[in-house]
Each structure stands twice: as C-alpha cells, then as structure tokens.
Image (cartoon, rainbow, N blue to C red):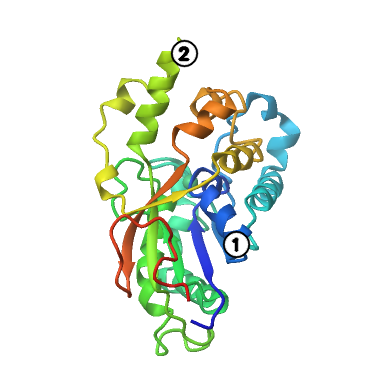
Amino acid sequence: MSERLSILTVHAHPDDESSKGAGTIARYAAEGIQTTLVCCTGGEAGDILNPAMDREEIKADLEEVRRAELKSAADIIGYGEVIWLGYRDSGMPDTEENAHPEAFANADHDEALGKLVEIIRRVKPQVLISYPEDQKRYPHPDHLQVTNLCLPAWDAAGDASMYPGAGDPWTPQKMYCSMWSRARMVATHDEFLARGLESPFGEGWLDRPGSDHKITATVEVDNRIRREALLAHGTQVDPKSPFWFGLPVEVQDNIHPFDDYMLMKSRIDVEPNEEDLFAGLRD
Ligand SMILES: [Zn+2]
C-alpha cells in the first residue's frame, strides 16, 4: 500500500477525543501515522463541571475557551490536524438546546454528510473511528448524529457519483467505534475498595450489563495521555473528579492500559482479537 497510513476520528464534542481513544491516537502519531480529528460541535451546551472555572468571564467566552482547550488536548494527544465541522452542541436529550436551528442534531443530512465526505477524501484514512450504532446507554443527540453520518460516509466517500465536487473518491478500509470497558470499570472499582476509598462506580454502574463481549480490538496504550488530555479541558473536567482521577497516577495507569474497540465495518479480512487497528493494512 503506497498511501501513508492515516486514521480519522469523528467526535461530537470537545473532550470526547480525550475520554475515548486518546492513547491510541498518541501511539499512532508517535509512529508517524497521519492522525486527524473531526470535532462536530463547539461543546457550547456542556456544563462547567470544574467549580474552579465556574466564573463569569469564562462563561462569557465559553466558545473560545473550549476551542483553546481542545487545541491543548489535541496537542497533548498528538493529533496532526483538528477540523471543526461547525455545528452547535445539541445539548442533552429533552433540553431546550435540542431545538436550536444550528444544533448538530438538526443539521441537514446531505450537507453534513458532504462535509464529512470531503474531509475523508482529503485526508485519506484507511481507518475511521465512529461511535456505536447502539447508544441506548448514553443517547446524546450529537453522539447519535456522529454515527448517522459515519455509516453513510463509509460508502459515499468512495462513490464517485456522490458529491462529485468534493474531491477524488477515497474508500476507507476499516471502521471502528471505541467501547466503554466494563472490565476496566470493575477493576477500578475494586481498587478503590481495596484502598478503603469510596468508589465513584456505585450500584447504578455495576448493575449494568457489560458489552465487553463485543470488543474485537484492544490497543495497548499509555493511560497518562488520556489523563493529561482530559485535564486540558479545564471547564469540562474537574481535576478533583474521583471518576477520572481518584486513584494515584501509577495505580490508575496499571489497571487497564488498553483502549477497546469494536469493528463496525471492514473491507479486508480481519483476525479475531486485534491489537492494532491497522492490522492487515501495513506493508
Ligand atoms: Zn460528547
């Protein structure tokens, strides 16, 4: 394969790129693989979750603050390029933000798909990262919209009859979504208890059935990247959050040093239990 290896991740909000798959991108960027982030919204509807940042001057300029935070996080992760798709955060389900005409969830489908197709044709990713089709657990309208666009883009980008003015056709070879690992959560929970600490993963979390059986790829990563990138989102992530930072750094890093993925689509044969999203695509 003569084209440079390239991975494109599509995320809904600033901070999603840090909480999901940051270590994977850092690893591939360090290898010299082209890494590109599409961030679909500005995160305007997200609450200020860090009490230290809950100040009037921050709120007055939240859009710019969140842009700068994403730039810092993307630099920490090692993204080669950040592309803003230009939509407004649609807010959580059943909130008044849902009705905003510029909300990503209300985007004209053909127009938004055309934007994504143009990006895919330009950056030529063999690997595309989307969100799962089943999002019953966290049905954020913007996360659902990411999947609604990535699924048709998988075919449209390589179809010369679609969006003929948007660049030469390019066909991605594999599409994954990142998965929330129950194994990671349980191990983290057990570690809190072993240390006599209160676990942020109470009954509501532990009662949920896991979907780890759907994981098809496990990439070994440095979890420190995720933590540092999350901290760059000063308005969205409380550095005192036990959920993200409640265990000592070195302990947290050893619990589950992996990012987990499910293969959604592939145009090549794929082995079970992959450890590399580019498996089968390297020379
Ligand atoms: Zn999000």
Query: Which labelled disc corresponds to residue 195?
Result: 2
Q: Would you call the spot at circle 2 few (<14 residues within 10 Å), some (14-19), or many (20 or more)?
A: few
Whole-percent x and y of residue 72?
A: 70, 48
Which secondary structure, mark 2? loop
Please state the horizontal and vertical placement of residue 122, each as a whole percent of the image: 57, 78
Name the residue carrying label 1.
Answer: 31
Residue appearing at x 75%, y 34% in the figure: 57
- Which residue is drawn at the image coordinates 40% and 46% (left, top)? 140
Q: Is residue 86 visible?
A: no
Q: What residue do we see at 29% from left, 43% from top?
A: 212
Q: Taking 134 as reference, is 103 left or right?
A: right
Residue 247 rendering spot, x and y as whole percentages = 53, 23
Residue 102 in sight from this viewpoint: yes
Asked if residue 169 is positioned above or below residue 185 in the image, the reply reads below
* Disc 2 Cβ-to-ligand 1 distance below 8 Å: no
Between residues 282 and 210, which one lies in front from this camera angle? 282
